[in-house]
Amino acid sequence: MGSKKPYFVAIATQVFLAGMSLLSKAAFASGMNTFVFVFYRQAAGAVFFLPLLFFLRRKESRSLSLKDFLKIFVISLIGMTVGFNAYGVAVDYTSANLGAAAFNCLPVTTFLFAVLLRMEKVNLRKVAGIAKAFGILICIGGVITLAFYKGPYLKPLIDHHLLKLHKSSHNIPHSSSSKTWIIGCFLLFVSSISWGLWFVLQAYFLKTYPSPLEFISYQTLLSAAQSFVIAIAMERDPSEWKLGWNIRLLAVVYCGVLVTVVSNFLQCWVIKEKGPVFQAMTTPLNVIATIIGSELLLGEGINLGSLIGAILLVISLYSVLWGKSKELNMVDSDSNIQTNVFVSPQLPKDLSEMRPTAEP
């Protein structure tokens, strides 16, 4: 059972992330402002992290330098504030299914920034390098397909959905306007780019910063403050800030606790147990869970273009992951060969052992 635990945890993480896409879309369909939603979800996560950060700071005598604070501020701005706000508007303009499909871009965009910052290498003379380059090209093709080809609408198999939401007037044109659809796809690409850069910058910063948990706590607190500034600038109507006992509050609590806190912790645990490649390979489960949830909860179908684009993103994901795993296997085999070559033979303790034995 212990060996199977990472599999169940990885599946649960992708289900939680699928729930984020579904409930976010449901909250936006009820008329909730996307920027207010992002602030509330980050504030909910900050409420959890604030006492934890206070406890960690009491145990550590080390103080946070101004240089590290500015680095954390920029990293949280790129990954959490810009990424989540762009993703929220994009899901509002497109669909929950498309938002889930965009997660398949993350390993590819992360790898692309790792190459640009010389954390990864691509050797086009080897099969592994060709596979990784092919994955990046397919990812670009998938993004273009999602943005510019909608195709026929595939109706959901189930007519009655559990969340009977009344779409507000400002949400109705989003599904029919090709302009807002393209803007939404572009913002999904922006969120994937910002999250890919976010992962790489975090890896750089954590090389010298001793506490990852403290790092995440600071990011969440700073992102809540940054998101508040954006939300108050974009929405001045006090009535739009009210939650109440409705789908908006459910979406905020779910995304703030189960995604910002629990999912981040579970992903770190899976990566520690099975490695980043294993965690990345479970990403397509997010799309499958979202498509099922969209039919059951939202009664939302999918366009043929979105389906084709999602398939291309999955292909690009596995192409990059296959190339990366092939490259790691080659490195391991080369290191084993070098180890065997440089092992010095064991000499006999007594030189007399080297004399040939006498003929009988």
Image (cartoon, grey):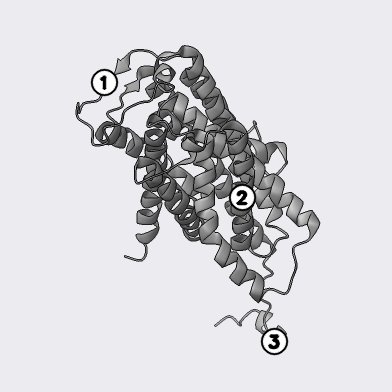
Could you tell me the amino acid type at mark 1?
Answer: Lys
Q: In which quarter of the image is residue 17?
A: top left
In this rendering, the label closer to the viewer, 1 or 3: 1
Q: Which residue lies furthest to the front in this view?
A: 238
**Pointer 1 local density, CA inside 10 Å: few below 14, some 14–19, many at least 20:** few
First along the sequence among labels 1 and 3: 1
Could you tell me the amino acid type at mark 3?
Answer: Asp
Q: In this view, does 334 lie above or below 127?
A: below
Cβ atoms under marks 1 and 3 closer than 8 Å: no
Residue lying at 36% horizontally and 19% vertically, measured from the top left? 303
Specify the quadrant that holds the N terminus: bottom left
Q: In this view, does 27 lie above or below 47?
A: above
Q: Distance between the residues labelled 1 and 2?
A: 48 Å
First along the sequence among labels 3 and 2: 2
What is the x, y in percent for residue 344? Answer: 69, 69
**Pointer 2 local density, CA inside 10 Å: few below 14, some 14–19, many at least 20:** few
Residue lying at 64% horizontally and 64% vertically, measured from the top left? 211
Residue lying at 58% horizontally and 37% vertically, measured from the top left? 231
Q: Can residue 105 be seen in this view?
A: no
The residue that disc 1 covers is 155
The residue that disc 3 covers is 350
- Specify the label residue 331 is tagged with: 2
